[in-house]
Amino acid sequence: MPQLKCVAKIYAPDLEPKIRHPKIIETFDKLKPGESFELSNDHDPKPLHYQFMIEREGAFKWEYLQTGPDKWRVIIGKI
């Protein structure tokens, strides 16, 4: 698969907790196939990954760029 084009960056702690996951999902939904965004967080976004696995099965790519201990960075792409 060709490399995904990163079109946005989100630092999750800047988002209010109650809108965090909806805003991230909204950002993903606006992507065109082959595009991605970088998500940074102060903890492992594993619950969000599970949500993507259920709600966007087969439509996304999830790749860790950094795995703690203080910062996690993930590329989330639309395939």
Image (spheres, rainbow, N blue to C red):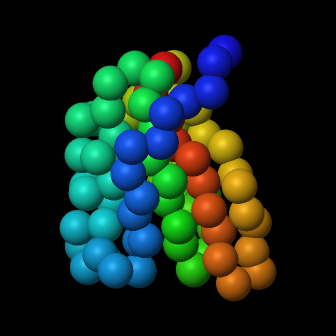
Can you see residue 64? yes
Q: Tell me the residue at 43%/31% (across/down).
A: 35
Q: Position of residue 54 (x, y in %)?
A: 46, 35
Q: Quadrant of the N terminus?
A: top right
Outermost residue, bottom direction?
A: 70
Nearer-the-camera pick, 49 or 26: 26
Q: Quadrant of residue 24?
A: bottom left
Q: Position of residue 34 (x, y in %)?
A: 46, 23
With 73 as the anchor, is 29 left or right in this view?
left
With 14 as the anchor, is 48 left or right in this view?
right
Above or below for 54 versus 8: above
Q: How many marks?
A: 0
Q: Position of residue 26 (x, y in %)?
A: 24, 46
Above or below for 57 versus 40: above
Nearer-the-camera pick, 41 or 22: 41
Outermost residue, top direction?
A: 1
Can you see residue 50? no
Q: Tell me the residue at 63%/18% (across/down).
A: 2
Q: Position of residue 39 (x, y in %)?
A: 49, 59
Q: Tell me the residue at 76%/80% (across/down).
A: 69
Q: Quadrant of residue 78?
A: top left
Above or below for 61 versus 48: above
Above or below for 77 versus 66: above
Q: Tell me the residue at 62%/62% (across/down).
A: 73
